[in-house]
Every structure is written in C-alpha cells, then in structure tokens.
C-alpha cells in the first residue's frame, strides 16, 4: 500500500524487489501469512502515532515458511529450516504479505511439525499474545479459576487452551452461538451482556482468581467485581486497565515463547482454529473479513 485508507489501497505488486537480508536476519520463502486486526488498523493509519510508517508498506506480522538464506551473524537457522514468526519491527514497511520476507532471528521459531502451513501461520501473534498474558503477566497455574472475555476470538481460543494446559479452570465469555466451540476448547461458556456478572458468580461464587480482557469496553467495568480479593487481571485492549489495578499487555516477539507454543502444539494440547483462507491476491477481502470481527478462528493468506 502506498497510502493509508480502506481495503482498496492494497495492491498486488508483481515486481517488488527481493528484500535485503541483514546480519541478524534470514530470508524466508513464505508459505502462508496470518491476517490480524492490527493489519487493517495499520492500513487505516490508526497506529501512526505508535509506529513509524515507511511507504510503500507490505502489511503483515504473522509468517510461516522455509529459510532460504541466512545473514552472516545467524547461527540459529540454516537454509531449508521450516519456521514461524511474529515478524514485528519497530517500524512498518516490510511485512509478511509477500513471497519473500527478511525476518530478524529474534522474531522466529521452528514450525510445529503437527501443523499445516496454513495453521502454522495463524499461531505466532495471537498465540504469543495469549501465552505472554497468561504465563508472564498473570502467572496462571493449576490453582486458578480464569475468566477470559471474548474467549472464542483469535486470541481467546489460544488463551482458553493455554490456561487449560496449565491446569486452570476456565470460564469464557462469548455469544451463545460460540458456546459449543468454547466447551470443545475446555471452557465453561457464559453469554455477553446483561446477566454476565450473575452467571459468572453462579459458576464461581468465591470469585475468579485471574481475568483476561480481550475485548475492552464493559469488560473493564465488570471484571473488578468478579475477582477474588487477591485476583489478578490484564487487558490487551485498553491500557487504562492499569488505573483499575490490572496490567496492560502488548505482545512482543520472543523465540523462547514461540518454542513453548510449538511444544504445546506438538504435545496435542494446543490447536490452531482456521476460519478461512484467501490467496495473497485477495488480501483486501481477508482484511475486510478481519475488520468485520465475527470470525471464529484465524484468517490466513496462502502464498505458496
């Protein structure tokens, strides 16, 4: 894209130059790229105050592919290695909606063997967000009862499974249509809206020890009412959570955390739900679907 705007600013370029590979980077031939809400927020200019934008911009932060070439300082990977990545740098310019991606090694991990390329591309950003919120910010363990707001969304589905893998009891909010899906993931579902507080209190009369907000809005108001006296909570949506006694979580690339997610996948404790796939040429339609906000699972661009 050469400017901010609606989905139509996304244009398929067939003559883009091969990206340069720095000393601490590798060149990855992409098989698939994940589509996340941050992608269309960047396209609309909503992240302009946070991240430097260097046009023309190739969107995308999620990646699955094969290492083609390594930089001279790289010892972690070799050509032919299958990798996944949350390829986020401190500026926006060269993203993952591309056949070839220059990725810093600090953003990469090895692809879980159990996942297809399509599934693997949906794991990094959302999986890391859920993992870092639950394990690093909130320290979830087997003694916890965890409330997850928007539990059937892209991050929520991972958060439910990770909390269950930690041995926690999980209560997940979602629309009635998502409740069977939430049960299959291991959560006890409750509906959004009126009656939420009463329903959570019915399931956990003493309160929940941990809460994770993935939706914002009313969730920030009701959550403190549902916590135990020493309850912990965090939001990935609204930084004002810190004013209410919670923690704000902004995901960061971490190869060790990617390895932990891959281990959960290969142990059969974490699955990647895929809502829909698109060819790379239809990235605009993929972002329209993401912005609609009703997909249950990951949206993926198939590249090769």
Image (cartoon, helix red, strand yellow):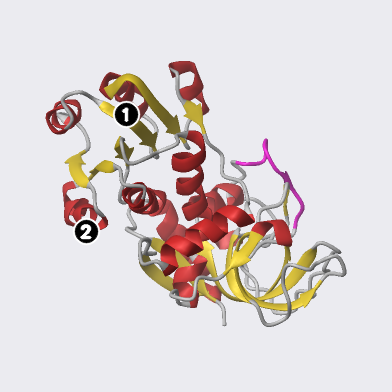
Does residue 49 belong to the magenta stretch?
Answer: yes
Residue 213 horizontal/vertical position (percent):
38, 35
Q: Residue at 37% across / 64% down in the picture?
A: 271
In the drawing, what numbered circle is on residue 188? none
Q: Quadrant of residue 198?
A: top left
Question: Nearest the camera: 254 or 46?
Answer: 254
Is residue 15 one of those drawn in magenta? no
Give residue 129's position: percent from left, percent from top: 50, 47
Can you say whether 118 is above or below 146 in the image?
Answer: below
- The residue lying at 50 percent from left, 35 percent from top is 137
Can see residue 123?
no
Mark in front: 2 vs 1: 1
Residues rendered magenta in the picture: 47-55
Quarter assignment of residue 189:
top left
Q: In the rendered image, which residue does mark 2 sit on? A: 184
On screen, residue 50 versus residue 251, left or right, reads: right
Q: How many marks?
A: 2
Please tell me which residue lies in front, 147 or 78.
78
Residue pointed to by mark 1: 209
The location of residue 226, given as percent across then percent down, is: 26, 24
Image coords of residue 164 (percent x, y) = 31, 49
**Compared to 58, does 156 lie above or below?**
above
One can see residue 58 in this view? yes
Q: Residue at x 41, y 50 (%)?
A: 155
Q: Disc 2 or 1, which lies upstream in sequence? A: 2
For the point 50% across and 55% down, the residue is 36
**Quadrant holding the N terminus:** bottom right
Residue 274 appears left or right of 51: left
């Amino acid at each position: 894209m050469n400017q901010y705007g609606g989905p139509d600013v996304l244009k398929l370029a067939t003559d883009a130059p091969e990206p340069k590979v720095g000393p601490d980077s590798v060149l990855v031939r992409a098989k698939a790229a994940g589509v996340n809400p941050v992608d269309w927020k960047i396209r609309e200019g909503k992240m302009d105050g946070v991240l430097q934008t260097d046009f023309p911009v190739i969107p995308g932060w999620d990646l699955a592919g094969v290492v083609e070439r390594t930089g001279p300082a790289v010892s972690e990977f070799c050509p032919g290695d299958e990798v996944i990545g949350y390829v986020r740098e401190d500026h926006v310019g060269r993203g993952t909606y591309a056949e070839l991606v220059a990725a810093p090694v600090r953003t990469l991990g090895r692809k879980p063997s159990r996942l297809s390329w399509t599934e693997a591309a949906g794991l990094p950003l959302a999986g890391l967000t859920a993992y870092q919120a639950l394990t690093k910010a909130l320290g979830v363990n087997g003694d916890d009862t965890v409330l997850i707001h928007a539990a059937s969304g892209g991050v929520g589905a991972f958060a439910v499974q990770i909390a269950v893998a930690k041995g926690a009891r999980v209560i997940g909010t979602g629309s009635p249509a998502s409740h069977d899906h939430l049960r299959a993931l291991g959560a006890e579902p409750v509906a959004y809206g009126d009656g939420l507080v009463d329903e959570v209190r019915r399931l956990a009369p003493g309160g929940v020890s941990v809460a994770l907000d993935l939706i914002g809005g009313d969730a920030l108001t009701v959550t403190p009412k549902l916590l135990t006296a020493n309850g912990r909570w965090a939001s990935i949506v609204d930084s004002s959570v810190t004013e209410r006694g919670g923690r704000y979580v902004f995901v960061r690339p971490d190869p060790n955390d990617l390895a932990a997610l891959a281990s959960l996948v290969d142990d059969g404790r974490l699955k990647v739900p895929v809502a829909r796939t698109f060819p790379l040429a239809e990235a605009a339609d993929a972002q329209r679907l993401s912005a609609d906000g009703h997909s249950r699972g990951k949206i993926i661009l198939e590249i090769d």
